[in-house]
Image (cartoon, rainbow, N blue to C red):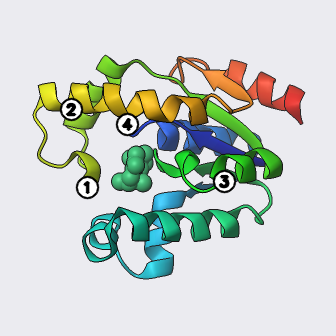
Amino acid sequence: MRIYLIGYMGCGKSTLGLKLAGELDLTFIDLDKFLEERNYKTVPQIFSEFGEEGFRLRERRALEEVSEFTDVVVATGGGAPCFYDNMELMNRTGITVFLDIETSIIAERLIKSKTERPLIAGKSKAELVRFIQESLKKRKPFYEQAQLRISKPDGALNEIIAEIRQKK
Ligand code: S3P
């Protein structure tokens, strides 16, 4: 079994992914961490050395690699579904789950988060909210190609597991 969690930065993919992996006895993979290990560089280093294009290429390569692993839950980076034919690759090789969380909650979480995210570095709260709204407009058509959609990842673990089991 292979499950891909997709959705905007800060929507809780890693938190949910860890819980799901524990419940379903699968291995959890954070795609950003995986590609950092493969490239011996952090995500911010990759962005500053190779630009976003270089990051997306490395992200694609990492995704191709994990798409051959079995019994994994993969938390993908927020942009991963929106480049190349990554969404098609994930839909073909696993169960895709979109964590559809409200902009205001995402903004709150991103402000508190300690993870360095080059695309939103240095933005004020107002700028961040505007940026999220604009980029979500472009990203939603990709996210919406997921097989399952969840709007409340925090309290809905059992429901998610039941839906995943049905899909299997
Ligand atoms: C990105 C999201 C990040 C990371 C990179 C770019 C994006 O992952 O891949 O900073 O384009 O939305 P998270 O969604 O885990 O923050």
Question: What residue sits right under mark 3 in the picture?
Answer: 85
Tell me the crowding category of disc 3: few under 14, some 14 to 19, or many 20 or more residues within 10 angstroms, Cα based.
few
How far apart marks 3 and 1 lie (CA) works out to: 23 Å
Query: Which mark lies nearer to you, 3 or 1?
Result: 3
Mark 3 vs 1: CB contact within 8 A: no
Using the numbered discs, state the Cα–Cα distance from disc 2 to disc 4 in whole angstroms. 12 Å
> Along the polypeptide, which appears first: circle 1 or circle 4?
4
Residue that mark 4 sits on: 10
Q: Position of residue 159 (x, y in %)?
A: 71, 18
Q: Taking the image as drawn, is residue 76 in sight? A: no
Name the residue type under label 3. Answer: Asp
Q: Secondary structure at mark 2?
A: helix
For image coordinates 28% across by 65% down, the residue present is: 44
Q: What amino acid type is highlighted by mark number 4?
A: Gly
Looking at the rendering, in which quadrant would you find the C terminus?
A: top right
Would you name the residue on which mark 1 appears? 118
Q: If you read the primary sequence from the N terminus, does the residue marked by circle 2 or circle 3 appear first?
A: 3
Q: Amino acid at mark 2?
A: Leu
**Mark 2 to mark 1 CA distance (whole Å):** 12 Å
Q: Does the Cβ of the disc 1 residue fall within 8 Å of ligand 1?
A: yes
Q: Position of residue 77 (x, y in %)?
A: 48, 50
Q: Which residue is mark 2?
A: 128
User: Residue 150 lies in what quarter of the image?
Assistant: top right
Q: Nearer the viewer, mark 2 or mark 3?
A: 3
